[in-house]
Amino acid sequence: AAPVAATALLPIVLFPVLGVMSTAETTTAYGNHLIFLFMGGFLIAVTMQKWNLHRRIAMLIIQFIGVSSDRMILGFMLATALLSMWISNTATAMMMLPIAIAVISEVDQLKSAGGEGASPGNGERKSNFGICLMLGIAYSASIGGVATLIGTPPNAILAGMAEKIYGLTIGFADWLAFGLPLSATMFLITWYYLTRIAYPLNEKDLPGIGRIISTELERLGPTSRQERWVLVVFMLVSIGWILRGLIDVPALSMVSDASIAMAGALLLFVIPSDTAEREFLLDWRTAASIPWDIIILFGGGFALAQGFIESGLSLWIADQMSTLEGASMITMISIATLIVIFLTEITSNTATATIMIPVLGALSIAMGLHPYSLMVPAAVAASFAFMLPVATPPNAIIFSSRYVTIPQMAKTGFWLNIIAVALISLFVLFLLPLVWGIDLAVI
């Protein structure tokens, strides 16, 4: 009925009117430090896009992996996943789409020249490569985002709500220790499933494809000084995030991941790109293009989480769900993951995470479990929706290419959803307690 960012402003009006929290208490949530972590990440990402660094990274990865059919798909998927760890999955998919279409067109022409008659939309062999490549880009854009705390909104929503409701802190390095292995495992399973089971590739060698990649790199020209500086800042921020979680420096105890992100963003504002013209790597015109609606949406989610506590709703939900106390942990994790994955197929993953994470946290408490036991799988599951074009922006972008039909996406995505449920459940049950040093059976 209204834009989702406008909806996210409702707590500022309704909480004071309904006596839940004052306006001052409610609006404080919109300035949560995790919002500035994402804002810093967004500013670094748009700077990479401004200087075409993301495109160069993608082309070099694809060129390095190889140009046989299955390795070409692996290269595209790897480039997409790695970029999605830091850049919006929507922007990444949009960037990769025209390159993928050029590659598929080249394959069609080569086959036609060889007398195989594989014109667009005609011929299973062409179809398999095209479908694999397109679905690989869509799925890896979502899978890659799970690896980092800033890779996809549900991760930040989880961190914010865990802190607001339970006083638990999830740092960038903490999430990386859990999210990266999970993301990498799902990535490899998806690539194998697409190229070996769902749409097996008959052709192995793709002569001429290397020429497209080389042409793209030639268009970019030699690496510019601006690209090198953006890469340096990006690496410094990434190293800062990781080291903060590994090294305890008492003098820097008040520095958070958000501080590091904003330090990187501020550096981009002051490093010159053209001294003579007084231009810098990042200007405000570019900075203003970041997705402010997502930032407002985070604020609304964090305000909602605070409302859960202040109103007593969390305790009430926990009481209502206490009848489920006898269920086994693995059963509850699997059911929660399954519900969120299939709910996300028809709703925004950010909205789904905002609604489900605090509810599942209350359910965890009702069952005598650590809140993370159901909150973490819900956050990850919100990003693993593979069946429908409306599920995620990358799915919609790839569907718009007309190389993939809804039945093809739904059939392939259904089995990947089921695999994801099993994988998330196992990783939460076994890896999460190990890397975060917690016992899921203890509140």
Image (cartoon, rainbow, N blue to C red):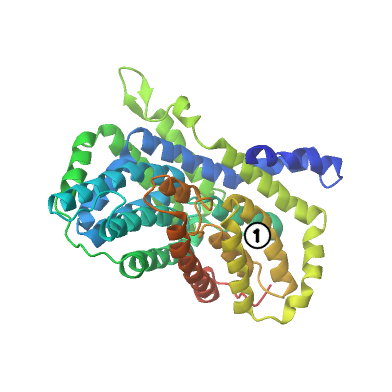
Q: Residue at x 51, y 73 (%)?
A: 422
Q: Quadrant of residue 81?
A: bottom left
Is residue 39 left or right of 229 when viewed as pictured?
right
Whole-percent x, y for residue 47 in the image = 40, 35
Q: Quadrant of the C terminus?
A: bottom right
Answer whether residue 247 is visible to the viewer in this image: no
Is residue 351 left or right of 273 when viewed as pictured?
right
- Mark 1: give few (<14), some (14-19) or many (20+) Cα within 10 Å: many
Whole-percent x, y for residue 130 in the image = 31, 54
Is residue 251 left or right of 19 when viewed as pictured?
left
Q: Quadrant of the N terminus?
A: top right
Whole-percent x, y for residue 289 in the image = 49, 31
- Residue at image mark 1: 357
Q: Quadrant of residue 186?
A: bottom left
Q: Residue at x 56, y 57 (%)?
A: 345
Whole-percent x, y for residue 316 in the image = 82, 64
Q: Residue at x 77, y 71 (%)?
A: 321
Q: Considering depth in this image, is 28 or 113 the residue closer to the camera?
A: 113
Q: Quadrant of residue 370?
A: bottom right
Q: Amino acid at mark 1?
A: Ile
Q: Residue furthest top?
A: 277
